[in-house]
Structures are given as structure tokens and as C-alpha cells.
């Protein structure tokens, strides 16, 4: 076995491994990118907004990290293929994914524009299928690889005017388990289900409630830990699950919600 291989097996953190992170221009994806970069991961970052993506890149470079940002729309199959190709061109291999991008697609079932339903499933679910489709053959070439799929407690709980969001997140939980069954033991695939986290998305989500500001405030107060989660809280869980420290964990679904689901 080469010295390089031995180092790979001894490496418990993402150090020197290559990951694609979607939704890295904002919120949890950005925090995850910074955390992985801090641990020495090589990163391919996805988002739509070039300037916010560039800002994430600049912050990563300031801490000495290695990352490439490619702006694009995850609903497009070829863009997902390009992300995988970029990982191979820049870093020679692909060790894992954090599929994190998501949109809300707000509206009640009777009012929701079918195009917005399609778009919500396109970004939240179909894009994950596309990325897995192109990434899995590359990850199977390695001794081990790891995927974290970001769903939501909305997979298990309803919210007013969130039918597309809740249904799409439930689909992700199912997709994660299915993929874990099909591609173990080489690829570990786990799902995280955050509760209310202080990112731009939660403020957009609150618009569906009669008093949006109060809804955000209450979302934090209603957790057992009496605060909103931070993007950093979620990044820490993703880092653990992607790392070899979670080497006996696959096909699992983790709520990370300040205890809100325990309240029922
Ligand atoms: N915040 C919460 O309370 C909460 C709770 C549970 C689960 N989640 C889930 O956590 C994930 C991250 O959410 P967040 O709260 O960090 O939200 P956020 O700050 O709004 O970030 C969403 C990210 O998704 C990207 N994105 C959206 N549509 C895209 C598309 N068509 N193509 C490529 N990228 C696209 C955005 O890119 P641009 O910014 O460049 O447009 C952005 O980087 C989402 O899946 C969300 O559903 C959030």
C-alpha cells in the first residue's frame, strides 16, 4: 500500500478529501463550506448567485482553504454533471456530497401554481437525484465515501402554506434511505432534518404566518433549548456525519431542532 493510501485511511477528518456542497452561497451551505474548508477539505461549491458565491470563496481563501465555486441552476441536469466533472478536474476524485440547496415554494394546495410545485421538487428533490446519479459512480471508485442530504423537520410536520416544501422534504428522507441501501458499504448516506435555523430562508418561510416577525421569534422560543439554531450548529452535524468518525452510520435520519420534535 502506498504512503498516500495509508494517510487516507488514517485521516479521520475531511482533510485532503474532496466534497461538493450545494447551496454554499448562503446560510447552512456557506457555514458548512467554511467548516469543511477549515478541516482541510477541497470543495466544489454550488449556488445561483455569483457575487454571494464569490464572497464564500473569499472567506474560504482567507482561512487558507481550497475551493471552486460554480454558479448555476441545480434543476438542470447538466449543471449537476458539471459539478462532478469540476471535482475530478480540480482535485482528481470525489469523496462526498452535502446536498443542501433548497427553496420553499410557498402556497396552499389550492392556490399553489403548478410551476412552483414543479420548481420546488426540481430544486429540493430532482437535483439531488441528478447529483447522486453523476457522483455515485465516481465515489464508488474510492474505498469509502459519504453523503449528507439536508431535508427538514418539515418532512414529518406540517406548516401552513408549505405543502410543496413538506412533501419534497419527506421525499428526501426516503431517497436518502434508498440510496444508503443501494450503495453501501462503500458509500454512507445520511439525512439531516433541521428545525428552525436562523438563515434567510426562515425569514422567507415566516411570510406564510399571520405575523412573520412573531413567527420567527416563536420558532426559537418553542424549542426545548429556547433559541433558533445557527447555521454553524448544522455545519457541525454535517461535518461529523461526513467524516470517518461516523463510519458505522448510514441510512440514518437525524433531527437537529433544539428538541422541537420531542415536544410533539
Ligand atoms: N433555515 C431553516 O430554518 C431550515 C430548516 C430546515 C431545513 N432547512 C433546509 O436547509 C437547506 C439550507 O437552507 P438555508 O436555511 O441555509 O437557506 P438559504 O440561506 O436560503 O440558502 C439556500 C441555498 O440554496 C441555493 N439554491 C436555491 N435554489 C437553487 C437553484 N435552483 N440552484 C442552485 N442553488 C439554489 C441558494 O443559492 P443562491 O443564494 O445563490 O440563490 C442558497 O445558497 C435547505 O434545503 C432548507 O430547506 C432550512
Image: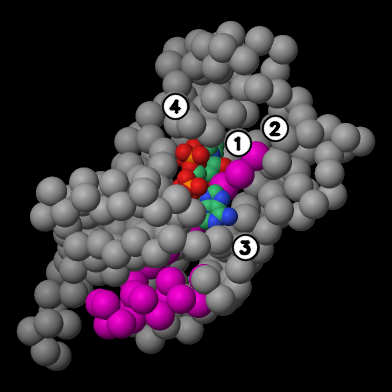
The residue identified by callout 1 is 153
Disc 3 to disc 2, C-alpha distance:
25 Å
- Residue drawn at 75 percent across, 43 percent down: 164
163 displayed left or right of 72: right
Asked whether residue 78 is in view, the answer is: yes
Q: Is mark 1 within 8 Å of ligand 1?
A: yes
Residue 100 counted in the magenta span: yes
Magenta residues, as a range?
A: 80-104
Mark 4 neighbour class, 10 Å CA radius: few under 14, some 14 to 19, many 20 or more: some
Camera-nearest label, 2 or 4: 4
Q: Nearer the viewer, residue 77 or 218?
A: 77
Give yes or no for contact between labels 1 and 2 (Cβ–Cβ under 8 Å): yes
What number is the disc on residue 157?
2
Marks 1 and 4: which is nearer the front? Answer: 4
Q: Is residue 194 left or right of residue 241?
A: right
Does label 3 point to a residue whose CB lies under 8 Å from ligand 1? yes
Above or below, 248 relative to 263:
below
User: Dot 3: few (<14), some (14–19), or many (≥20) neighbours within 10 Å?
Assistant: many
C-beta proximity under 8 Å, tags 1 and 4: no
Amino acid at each position: 500500500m502506498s504512503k498516500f493510501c495509508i494517510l487516507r485511511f488514517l485521516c479521520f477528518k475531511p482533510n485532503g478529501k474532496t466534497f461538493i456542497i450545494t447551496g454554499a452561497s448562503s446560510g447552512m451551505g456557506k457555514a458548512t463550506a467554511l467548516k469543511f474548508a477549515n478541516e482541510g477539505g477541497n470543495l466544489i461549491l454550488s449556488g445561483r448567485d455569483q457575487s454571494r458565491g464569490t464572497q464564500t470563496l473569499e472567506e474560504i481563501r482567507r482561512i487558507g482553504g481550497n475551493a471552486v465555486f460554480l454558479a448555476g441552476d441545480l434543476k438542470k441536469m447538466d449543471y449537476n454533471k458539471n459539478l462532478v466533472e469540476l471535482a475530478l478536474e480540480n482535485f482528481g476524485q470525489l469523496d462526498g456530497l452535502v446536498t443542501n440547496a433548497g427553496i420553499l415554494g410557498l402556497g396552499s394546495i389550492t392556490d399553489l401554481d403548478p410551476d412552483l410545485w414543479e420548481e420546488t421538487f426540481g430544486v429540493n428533490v430532482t437535483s439531488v437525484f441528478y447529483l447522486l446519479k453523476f457522483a455515485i459512480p465516481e465515489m464508488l471508485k474510492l474505498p469509502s465515501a459519504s453523503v449528507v442530504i439536508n431535508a427538514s423537520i418539515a418532512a414529518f410536520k406540517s406548516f401552513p402554506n408549505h405543502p410543496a416544501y413538506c412533501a419534497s422534504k419527506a421525499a428526501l428522507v426516503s431517497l436518502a434511505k434508498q440510496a444508503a441501501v443501494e450503495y453501501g458499504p462503500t458509500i454512507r448516506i445520511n439525512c439531516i432534518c433541521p428545525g428552525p435555523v436562523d438563515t434567510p430562508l426562515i425569514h422567507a418561510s415566516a411570510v406564510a404566518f399571520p405575523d412573520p416577525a412573531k413567527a420567527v421569534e416563536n420558532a426559537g422560543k418553542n424549542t426545548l433549548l429556547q433559541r433558533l439554531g445557527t447555521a454553524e450548529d448544522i455545519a457541525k452535524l454535517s461535518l461529523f456525519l461526513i467524516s470517518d468518525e461516523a463510519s458505522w452510520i448510514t441510512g440514518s435520519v437525524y433531527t437537529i431542532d433544539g428538541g422541537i420534535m420531542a415536544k410533539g
